[in-house]
Image (cartoon, rainbow, N blue to C red):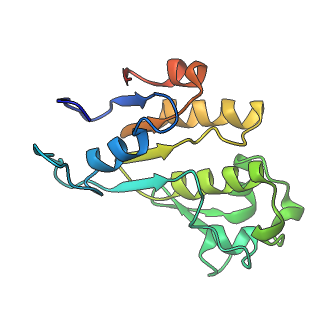
Amino acid sequence: IRPFSTRVLGGDRIGIVGPNGAGKTTLLNILTGVLPPDTGTITLGTNLEQVTMDQRRDILDPAMTLAQTLTGGAGDSVQVAGQKRHVIGYMKDFLFAPEQANTPVGVLSGGERARLTLALAFARPSNLMVLDEPTNDLDLETLELLQELLADYPGTALIVSHDRDFIDRVVTATIA
């Protein structure tokens, strides 16, 4: 990364764009403190509660069911923004049918896994949402849902995406 300086403030929506191999994910990891910069400094805000959605969706256990994944395997409720929600109702928010509750994650399509990962990310308390290629495998309906969720998200968002239309709709600034 060439000499670079930026300031990200609370509530900002920052898009990071560039060709494959340009270092978008590396920059994201440096900005969030996952990787140290070779030179210079990164100063993170205080009381950060970060939630990350990576493009590989590594947090999903293929042996668990959709409902178990959302509830952590405990009961039939999901904690969302400090409030208990029934898992079926929360699943519906993310375009899942009630009969999918006992479907193993391992048989879900790529788009369904992406929706499940989004559901997990938006259920966790956070003030920094880090999304690395969140639009991969999303259909138009889920893409619109993600845009609405980000519009209502009260925290800061860092978003890497190749989808310039999506980026242009949801960000307040772009790093290219």
Q: Is residue 154 visible?
A: no
Q: Is residue 29 left or right of residue 142?
A: left
- Residue 7, horizontal then vertical, whole percent: 19, 31
Q: Nearer the viewer, residue 79 or 168?
A: 168
Q: Is residue 13 above or below residue 88?
A: above
Q: Nearer the viewer, residue 52 or 98?
A: 52
Q: Is residue 123 left or right of residue 49?
A: right
- Which residue is outermost to the right? 99
Q: Is residue 6 left or right of residue 61?
A: left
Q: Nearer the viewer, residue 76 or 137?
A: 137
- Residue 135, horizontal then vertical, whole percent: 63, 38
Quarter occupied by the C terminus: top left
Where, by quadrant of the figure, is residue 52 drawn? bottom left
Q: Is residue 25 above or below residue 119?
A: above
Where, by quadrant of the figure, is residue 64 drawn? bottom right
Q: Is residue 155 above or below residue 76?
A: above
Q: Nearer the viewer, residue 4 or 20?
A: 20
Question: Residue visible at 60% across and 59% down?
Answer: 57
Where, by quadrant of the figure, is residue 169 drawn? top right
Q: Is residue 119 visible?
A: yes
Q: Is residue 85 above or below residue 29?
A: below
Question: Residue visible at 47% across and 59% down?
Answer: 124
Quarter occupied by the N terminus: top left
- Residue 104, horizontal then vertical, whole percent: 80, 72
Question: Residue visible at 23% across and 32% down?
Answer: 9
- Residue 109, horizontal then vertical, whole percent: 81, 55
Q: How many marks?
A: 0
Q: Is residue 2 left or right of residue 81?
A: left
